[in-house]
Image: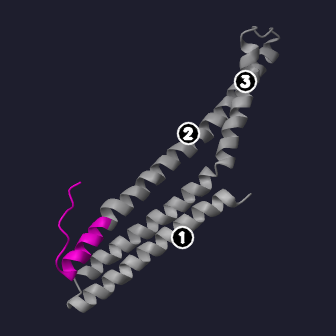
Amino acid sequence: MDNPKLPDSPRAALEAFIHEIGSSYYVWYDRSVDRLREMTLGLHWAALLTGVFASLLTAFFTQKGVEMPPLLRPVVIILPTVGSLLTGILVQGKLVERYRLRVEGQLAIQSLNNEAREVFASLKSDAEISEYHRSLRQRVDQIEEKQSEGFFDLLRSGK
Protein backbone atom coordinates (compact mmCIF):
# COMPACT_ATOMS: atom_id res chain seq x y z
CA MET A 1 0.00 0.00 0.00
CA ASP A 2 1.39 3.36 -1.02
CA ASN A 3 1.28 5.87 1.84
CA PRO A 4 0.93 9.46 0.71
CA LYS A 5 3.37 11.98 2.08
CA LEU A 6 2.17 13.53 5.31
CA PRO A 7 1.71 17.29 5.36
CA ASP A 8 4.77 19.07 6.75
CA SER A 9 3.11 22.22 8.10
CA PRO A 10 0.05 23.00 10.20
CA ARG A 11 -1.58 24.81 7.26
CA ALA A 12 -1.00 21.88 4.89
CA ALA A 13 -2.29 19.43 7.52
CA LEU A 14 -5.46 21.44 8.07
CA GLU A 15 -5.97 21.81 4.34
CA ALA A 16 -5.60 18.03 3.90
CA PHE A 17 -8.09 17.38 6.70
CA ILE A 18 -10.64 19.79 5.24
CA HIS A 19 -10.23 18.01 1.93
CA GLU A 20 -10.74 14.65 3.70
CA ILE A 21 -13.97 15.90 5.29
CA GLY A 22 -15.37 16.76 1.87
CA SER A 23 -13.97 13.86 -0.12
CA SER A 24 -14.29 11.04 2.39
CA TYR A 25 -16.72 11.76 5.23
CA TYR A 26 -19.25 13.69 3.16
CA VAL A 27 -19.09 11.21 0.28
CA TRP A 28 -19.76 8.32 2.67
CA TYR A 29 -22.81 10.07 4.16
CA ASP A 30 -24.04 11.05 0.70
CA ARG A 31 -23.88 7.45 -0.54
CA SER A 32 -25.49 6.14 2.62
CA VAL A 33 -28.34 8.66 2.36
CA ASP A 34 -28.88 7.81 -1.32
CA ARG A 35 -28.88 4.06 -0.64
CA LEU A 36 -31.29 4.33 2.29
CA ARG A 37 -33.59 6.71 0.37
CA GLU A 38 -33.74 4.29 -2.58
CA MET A 39 -34.36 1.28 -0.34
CA THR A 40 -37.02 3.07 1.70
CA LEU A 41 -38.89 4.49 -1.28
CA GLY A 42 -38.60 1.23 -3.21
CA LEU A 43 -40.00 -0.83 -0.34
CA HIS A 44 -42.76 1.72 0.35
CA TRP A 45 -43.92 1.74 -3.26
CA ALA A 46 -43.61 -2.02 -3.69
CA ALA A 47 -45.64 -2.65 -0.51
CA LEU A 48 -48.28 -0.15 -1.58
CA LEU A 49 -48.57 -1.43 -5.13
CA THR A 50 -48.83 -5.09 -4.16
CA GLY A 51 -51.84 -4.27 -1.97
CA VAL A 52 -53.44 -2.06 -4.62
CA PHE A 53 -52.93 -4.64 -7.34
CA ALA A 54 -54.40 -7.44 -5.22
CA SER A 55 -57.42 -5.26 -4.37
CA LEU A 56 -57.96 -4.31 -8.00
CA LEU A 57 -57.80 -7.93 -9.14
CA THR A 58 -60.28 -9.00 -6.49
CA ALA A 59 -62.60 -6.06 -7.17
CA PHE A 60 -62.52 -6.64 -10.92
CA PHE A 61 -63.58 -10.25 -10.71
CA THR A 62 -66.10 -9.60 -7.94
CA GLN A 63 -67.68 -6.69 -9.82
CA LYS A 64 -67.96 -8.56 -13.11
CA GLY A 65 -69.40 -11.63 -11.46
CA VAL A 66 -66.84 -13.70 -13.31
CA GLU A 67 -65.02 -16.50 -11.61
CA MET A 68 -61.38 -15.72 -10.99
CA PRO A 69 -59.05 -17.91 -13.05
CA PRO A 70 -57.38 -20.56 -10.91
CA LEU A 71 -53.93 -19.21 -11.69
CA LEU A 72 -54.81 -15.79 -10.25
CA ARG A 73 -56.13 -17.07 -6.92
CA PRO A 74 -52.67 -17.69 -5.47
CA VAL A 75 -51.54 -14.29 -6.78
CA VAL A 76 -54.35 -12.54 -4.88
CA ILE A 77 -53.29 -14.39 -1.73
CA ILE A 78 -49.55 -13.92 -2.20
CA LEU A 79 -49.57 -10.20 -3.09
CA PRO A 80 -50.86 -8.95 0.29
CA THR A 81 -48.45 -11.34 2.00
CA VAL A 82 -45.56 -9.86 0.03
CA GLY A 83 -46.79 -6.35 0.87
CA SER A 84 -46.89 -7.24 4.56
CA LEU A 85 -43.40 -8.70 4.36
CA LEU A 86 -42.07 -5.55 2.70
CA THR A 87 -43.76 -3.37 5.31
CA GLY A 88 -42.26 -5.54 8.03
CA ILE A 89 -38.79 -5.06 6.55
CA LEU A 90 -39.33 -1.30 6.55
CA VAL A 91 -40.54 -1.23 10.13
CA GLN A 92 -38.26 -3.85 11.67
CA GLY A 93 -35.23 -2.62 9.72
CA LYS A 94 -36.01 0.90 10.93
CA LEU A 95 -35.08 2.18 7.49
CA VAL A 96 -36.84 5.52 7.84
CA GLU A 97 -35.12 6.18 11.18
CA ARG A 98 -31.75 5.12 9.75
CA TYR A 99 -32.33 7.41 6.77
CA ARG A 100 -33.11 10.33 9.11
CA LEU A 101 -29.99 9.61 11.17
CA ARG A 102 -27.74 9.58 8.11
CA VAL A 103 -29.29 12.79 6.73
CA GLU A 104 -28.52 14.46 10.06
CA GLY A 105 -24.92 13.26 9.81
CA GLN A 106 -24.65 14.41 6.21
CA LEU A 107 -25.94 17.88 7.09
CA ALA A 108 -23.60 18.15 10.08
CA ILE A 109 -20.55 17.14 8.02
CA GLN A 110 -21.52 19.50 5.20
CA SER A 111 -21.97 22.37 7.64
CA LEU A 112 -18.61 21.62 9.25
CA ASN A 113 -16.91 21.44 5.86
CA ASN A 114 -18.42 24.78 4.80
CA GLU A 115 -17.34 26.41 8.06
CA ALA A 116 -13.81 24.99 7.80
CA ARG A 117 -13.41 26.36 4.28
CA GLU A 118 -14.51 29.80 5.46
CA VAL A 119 -12.25 29.83 8.51
CA PHE A 120 -9.20 28.35 6.74
CA ALA A 121 -8.18 31.53 4.93
CA SER A 122 -8.53 33.70 8.03
CA LEU A 123 -6.12 31.70 10.19
CA LYS A 124 -2.67 33.28 10.30
CA SER A 125 -0.36 31.73 12.86
CA ASP A 126 0.63 28.09 13.14
CA ALA A 127 -0.79 28.08 16.68
CA GLU A 128 -4.21 29.28 15.44
CA ILE A 129 -4.16 26.75 12.64
CA SER A 130 -3.21 23.88 14.95
CA GLU A 131 -5.85 24.82 17.50
CA TYR A 132 -8.57 25.03 14.85
CA HIS A 133 -7.43 21.71 13.35
CA ARG A 134 -7.67 20.05 16.77
CA SER A 135 -11.13 21.57 17.31
CA LEU A 136 -12.29 20.49 13.87
CA ARG A 137 -11.04 16.93 14.45
CA GLN A 138 -12.91 16.78 17.76
CA ARG A 139 -16.12 18.00 16.15
CA VAL A 140 -15.87 15.40 13.38
CA ASP A 141 -15.30 12.76 16.06
CA GLN A 142 -18.39 14.01 17.94
CA ILE A 143 -20.52 13.70 14.80
CA GLU A 144 -19.21 10.19 14.21
CA GLU A 145 -19.85 9.19 17.84
CA LYS A 146 -23.37 10.59 17.70
CA GLN A 147 -24.03 8.67 14.48
CA SER A 148 -22.66 5.46 15.96
CA GLU A 149 -24.68 5.82 19.15
CA GLY A 150 -27.82 6.66 17.18
CA PHE A 151 -27.38 3.63 14.94
CA PHE A 152 -26.88 1.22 17.83
CA ASP A 153 -29.73 2.81 19.79
CA LEU A 154 -31.98 2.01 16.82
CA LEU A 155 -30.85 -1.61 16.88
CA ARG A 156 -31.46 -1.90 20.64
CA SER A 157 -34.75 -0.04 20.81
CA GLY A 158 -38.03 -1.82 20.49
CA LYS A 159 -39.69 1.30 19.13
When asked about the image quadrant of residue 78, the answer is top right
Give the SS element for disc 3.
Answer: helix
The N terminus sits in image quarter: bottom left
- Magenta region, residue range: 1-20
The residue that disc 3 covers is 78
Give the residue at x 21% y 89%: 126
Point out the residue furthest to the front here.
Answer: 1
| Left or right, residue 78 beside residue 34 | right
When asked about the image quadrant of residue 71, the answer is top right
The residue that disc 2 covers is 42
Callout 1 crowding tier (Cα within 10 Å): few <14, some 14–19, many ≥20: some
Looking at numbered disc 1 in the image, what kind of residue is underneath it? Answer: Lys
Give the residue at x 55% y 55%: 99
> Which numbered disc, 1 or 3, marks the residue that appears first in the sequence?
3
Residue 59, position as x, y percentages in the image: 77, 21
Frontmost of labels 1 and 2 is: 1
Give the SS element for disc 2.
Answer: helix
| Left or right, residue 68 beside residue 104 | right
Q: CA distance from mark 2 to mark 3?
A: 19 Å
Q: CA distance from mark 1 to mark 2?
A: 28 Å
The C terminus sits in image quarter: bottom right
Cβ–Cβ below 8 Å for labels 2 and 3? no
Callout 2 crowding tier (Cα within 10 Å): few <14, some 14–19, many ≥20: few
The label number, if any, that marks residue 17 in the structure image: none
Looking at numbered disc 3 in the image, what kind of residue is underneath it? Answer: Ile
Q: Is residue 96 magenta?
A: no
73 over 151 or under it: above or below: above
Give the SS element for disc 1.
Answer: helix
> Which numbered disc, 2 or 3, marks the residue that appears first in the sequence?
2
The residue that disc 1 covers is 146
Give the residue at x 37% y 79%: 136
Frontmost of labels 1 and 3 is: 1
